[in-house]
Image (tube, rainbow, N blue to C red):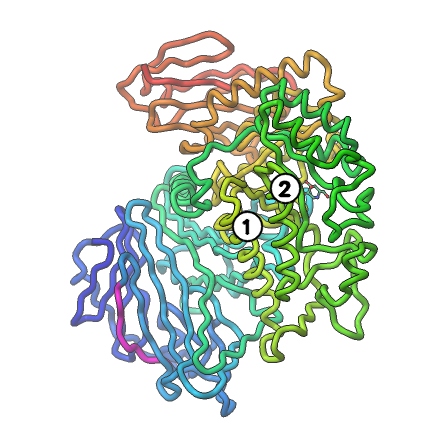
Amino acid sequence: MAIRILQKEKLFSLEGKHTQYVFSIDENNLVRHLYWGKKINNLEDFSPEKIVEISSNDPTLELTKEEYSPQGGLRYKESCLKVQFQDGTRDIVYSYEGYEIIHDTLIIKIKDKNYDFFKINLYYKIYEDEDILERWTEIKNQGNEDVVVENILSAEFNLPEGEKYTLTNVHGRWAGEQVQFKQDLSYGKTVLESRRGVSNHNHNPYFILDSGANEDYGDVYFAALKYTGNFKIVIENTPYNTTRALIGINDFDFMNTLEPSESFVTPKVICGYSFLGFGNMSRRLNNFALKYVIPEEQRNKIRPVLYNSWEATTFNVKVEEQKKLAKKAQEMGVELFVIDDGWFGRRNSDKDGLGDWYVNKEKFPQGLGELVDYVNSLGMDFGIWVEPEMVNPESDLYKQHPDWVYSFPKRYRNTLRNQLVLNITKREVKDFIITFLDKLLTDYNIKYIKWDANRPISEGGAYNLPKNKQRMLWYKHIESLYQIVDELRKKHPEVSFEACASGGGRIDYGALSHFTEFWTSDNTDALDRLMIQYSYSFIYPTKAMRAWVTDCPNFVNNRYIPLDFRFHSAMLGTLGIGGNINKWSEEELRLAKEKVREYKDIRNIIQKGNLYRLKSPYEGQISAFQYSIKSQESVLFVFLRGQNFGVFKHNINLKDLNENSMYEVIYDNVTYKKSGAYLMNLGIDIILIGDCASKLIKIREI
Ligand code: DGJ
C-alpha cells in the first residue's frame, strides 16, 4: 500500500518500494513533518513528542517542522505562503480540515481559522515503484472578498536532524552552464533562484542535499521543480540544528490577487530520498522521466541522430550549401537534418527578422519546400529552428505591433541580442504564434522544432492583464508557452520539440513535460561538455540531452580535440553533428560514418539504460561513464583529459553486472571473456595515450 494512514493518530505515510515519508496532524492542528527516509513498517512507532517552547524567544512554531509553513503568528522562519486578506490581515493561522485520497494522491486539506473561506490543499502523489514522490499545493478563495497572494511555494522539506548537509547544484552562464558545485551548509540561508523568466544558465531548479554520500552510498535528499520560469530555492539551517528546504515559484515581482471562487495551483515538485548515493538518485529520476515526464507521444521513441547547420553556416543560409550539407549528413548516417537560425524574414544577422516568419526568398528562391523535399528524398527527416517568443524591433511584426512586447510606457525598451520579448500572455500574440507554427508544420513535412529563446524578460509590463494580476506575467508567460507548445503537439503529434534558451537556459522538468529534449549548451567543446553533461545527468534523463560533434578549434575555448574523442563525448547523450561537414576531410567523414553506425548500435543502451558515473570529470584527468541495461549489456566510455608523467594505464571497475555471469568485452576490436565478478572487482585496464584520448568498450553477457 503506497498510502497508509493511522486514523486515530492522524498519521499519514507515503511509501515507495524502499522509502517512506511520514507526517501527522499534531495537537495544535499543525501538519507536522515526522520522517523522510528508509521504510519503517510499524507506523505505531511514530509517537511524536509534544513540542514545548524553549524560551520566550524560541516559540513552538519555530521549533515545529511543518509540512508547509505559512507566514503568520510566531513564525520567523522562511515561509511558503504569504497572503493579505481584505481587512489588511497579513497573517495565516491554519487548521486541519481533513484528507482525501484519489488514486495514488493524498490531499491534506487545511483552511485559515478565521478566514475559513481560504483553503489550502497539500498534494502528495506517490510513485511506488520508482520511489518518487510528487508534491504541490493549491489555494482556493471560496469567499466573497479578494485575497492577495504575495508568495506561494510548491513545497517545504524538513531533513533528518543531526546531520550536516552538503548542497549540490550548478552555477554558470551562457556557454558555461551546468558547472557543478558542492557547498557545505552553514548557518543561515542559501538561496538559489532565477528572476529572468526562464529557468536560466545560472542555477537549476532543484536541490540535492546529502550527508557524506558518494555515487554508491549514503543519504541523499533531492527535489526538482517542474517549472521553466522564475524559481526560488531556500535552504535554511535553523538555530535548532535542523535543515529545511523550500522550493517553488520565485516571489520576485510576484503577486496574485485571488478573486472570489479563484484558485491557484503551484508547479509540482519531483522528490525522493536515496540511501544508495547520487547514482541511485539519478537512475531513479532518469527512469521516472522516461516513464512519466517526457511528452507521451514521443516518450518511447528512440531519439534520432541529427545534423544541425548552425555552427556551419550561422545566418549565412543558402539553399545549395544546405543541400550539400544534407547530402554529407545523409552519407554519414544522419536521420534528421535541422536548419537553424537564418532561414526566414530579413534574417542575415541577429539584428532583424525575428517575428517575420516567412521564408526568405533570396535564400530559398524556390521556397523552403526545395530543401525539405531534398532532405526527405535522402531518407532523412527535416527539422527547423524558431524563436517564437521574441521579436527584433527592426522587424515588420514589431512595426505593426509595437504593443506586443513587455514594456513600461515611459521606460526604454532594453534589447538584448537586438531583441525584445513578446507578451505571449496576450491572446492575439499567442494566436499569432500558434498560427504561424501550425502553418509551417502543415505546409512542410517538418518533424522537429528547435524552440529557442535568447534573452531574459525585462521591463515586465503586461497591461493586458487586470491590474491586480500584472505581476503574474512571469507565471502567465510560462503558462502560455506550455499552452502554445501543447496545442501544436496536439495538432502535430509526430513532431518533436527541442527546448533551447541560448543553449541550456531551459533545462528543467517544467520544460521536459512539454518538450521532447533539451539543447544542453552552446558550448560544444568536447572536454567542457564532459563536465556539463556529468552535472546534467544528476537530475535529468540522458535521452533528453542533445550533444553535437562540432569543428575545431572550438569557438568557446579555441581548443583542438581529436574527432574520435568529440564523438565519444557527444555519444554520452543523443548524438548530433554540428560541424561544417562540407569541409571535413575524407578521413573525417569516414570516421564520422563509423561512429554514427556505432552509436546507432548502442543508443538503445544509452538512451534507455542506467548510467553509472564511474569517474567524475571534475576530479581528475580520467572520467568514465557506463550505461547498462538489466546487467546484460553495457557500454563504457573512458576519457583522458591530458596525459601526465607517462601514465597510460587506467583501471576501471565496472558496475551492474551479474557476478556469476560471463561477459564478452569488446575493446579495441579484440574480444575478451571475463566474469562479472572479475570485471566489477578487478576491472579492466584501459590504455589511453596523449591528450584528449578516449575509448568505447562494449560488454555483453554471454
Ligand atoms: C542560440 C542557440 O543555442 C544556438 O544553438 C543557435 O540556435 C542560435 N541561438 C541561433 O541564433
Question: Any atom of ligand 1 within 8 Å of the CB at mark 2?
Answer: no
Label 1: state its secondary structure.
helix
Q: Nearer the viewer, residue 524 or 50?
A: 524
Q: Nearer the viewer, residue 71 or 100?
A: 100
Height in image: 646 above or below 228?
above
Earlier in the chain: of badge 1 and badge 2, it is 2
66 horizontally vs 226: left or right: left
Label 2: state its secondary structure.
helix
User: Looking at the image, can residue 213 be seen?
Assistant: no
Q: Picture coordinates of residue 347 (x, y %)?
A: 80, 44
314 inside magenta stretch:
no
Farthest residue toward the bottom?
Answer: 87
612 horizontally vs 433: left or right: left
Spatial distance from mark 1 to mark 2, Cα to Cα?
14 Å
Specify start and end residues of the magenta stretch as a single range. 94-101
User: Looking at the image, can residue 13 be seen?
Assistant: yes
Which residue is the site of mark 2?
443
**Magenta stretch: dominant SS?**
strand
